[in-house]
Amino acid sequence: MFDKKSFSTDIYNGVKPLHFLGQLVGLAPYFYVRNTQTGEESIDISSRSNVKKIIWALVLLVVQITGLSFKIAGSIINPPDSIMDLVNDVIQFPFFGATSTVAITLAVTINRKKMLLFLHTLSVIDKVLFPKRNIYKKQQIQLLIAVACTSVVSAVIFYLDIYYYYTYNLLYIITIYVPDFVWSVNELQFMNLVEVLRVRLVTLNARICTVFASDSYMQDASRSTRKRNVQRAGRLVSVPHAVGSNYTKHPRRRQTCKEFLGDIIEISCGESKITSRILKLRKIYNNLYEMCCLINTMYGYMLLQEFTSYAVCMIVDGYNLICFLVAIYKSEDPMVPPEGYPALILWNLSNLIRPFLLCLSCQKLNNEFKTTLKSIQTLELQSDVKIGVSDQLRQFSSQVQNCKMGFSACGFFDINLSLFCAVVLTATTQITVLVLLDRQTEMTFRLSPSSSPL
């Protein structure tokens, strides 16, 4: 039924760069297939067909958990000299590892089935919204650029960070760089799904704005054109003279007409045609809302964990950067070697840019949702709308209000630009408190009798 060798599906071509990278880090233990009978695109999530991918993901999971356990145990047995190193080993690194291990665990277990449902709904929607399937070429180019930028930035940070730490071994790679790269790929997968949903919602908004287009064309057509069409239909089938007049005077009635091609069809005139279009748009929106709910269930907990980790990383790395700059300004020996300055800057930029991009993608979807609701309410307020059409628009507006599209971290907070500002302000406040406490401790040490040279 499914052709495993056919990888030329449109959806797969759109996500090919990200899917390859996801398989490399254990976040995509499945492959794309196409139903040879219906042409529907899907994924094969069976364990028998994906044994190698699942084993590779489990190996990465076990290696990261083992390395993280050794790192925490070593920090407890042999505590670091400075408090910041202790915070890095006990708090920051475990957050890195936990974010990566949770992402791989969910990808191997429950997210595969949810991804199957997501692609099934996406395939159904794209048959209606994108008959030519030309949307995936642009998506492939965008993902290729995103994957290339992520890989290059991770490699540059890894190279420059050699000068940041005094000791480099396999344990640091397992507990820092592998989890960070897995974390980045997981974010790319989430933002890709959000962008897929946003593009479909933009297309739906365009359909909503033109819901009266065909009907307006029918009402504004010239009288001679309508008369000529009725005469052509009358030559092929016996149509009462009242049909032409009733078609213009009573647009709600359903009339049986004879088209010039020779087939007798029953068409919905005026109100019933618009009602049919609105029902189709409501069905499409319902499918988009189901896709949004699936994304929320797949990434809700990971978003909560990621933004908590971002807050911790902003505080720790930001405090290290300020201490480094203060030491240079006072001509003192910094806590890190001067060669580690570029890596420290890149870590701080990464801690700011990545959550900003996450919040921006969700904010853009939220803006499109507001556009959807505004478009429907604008159509509903038109004065020349029939009663039946007005009822459908009112129901559509109620449906959109009750089925709000957006993302949250397990319901604790919504993912948007307001969240990014809140995280940055929280990290800035904590860094300020740490700097003040450090300065107060330094002044107390200088004024204490034990520090006197006598």
Image (cartoon, rainbow, N blue to C red):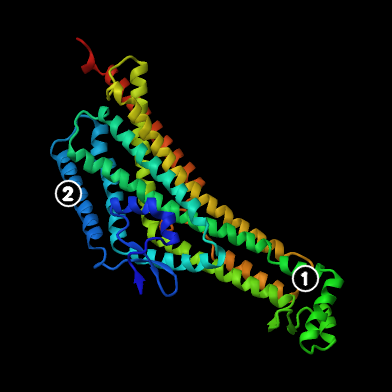
Placement of the C terminus among the 4 image quadrants: top left
Q: Is residue 349 visible?
A: yes
Badge 2: few (under 14), some or many (20 or more) residues near its Cα, within 10 Å? some
Secondary structure under the numbered disc 1 in the rendered image: helix
Secondary structure under the numbered disc 2 in the rendered image: helix
Badge 1: few (under 14), some or many (20 or more) residues near its Cα, within 10 Å? some
**Residue at 36% from the left image edge and 54% from the top image edge:** 19
Instruction: Tell me the number on the disc at residue 66.
Output: 2
Task: Pick the residue in front: 35 or 383.
Answer: 35
Task: Pick the residue in front: 181 or 336.
Answer: 181
Q: Is residue 303 visible?
A: no
Q: Position of residue 329 (x, y in %)?
A: 37, 17
Amino acid type, label 2: Thr
Q: Quadrant of residue 375?
A: bottom right
Compared with 168, 288 (above or below) is below
Instruction: Tell me the number on the disc at residue 174.
Output: none
- Of circles 2 and 1, the one toward us is 1
Q: CA distance from mark 2 to mark 1?
A: 70 Å
Residue 291 placement, left or right of 281 = left
Q: Position of residue 198 (x, y in %)?
A: 53, 56
Check disc 1 and report the residue beneath it: 218
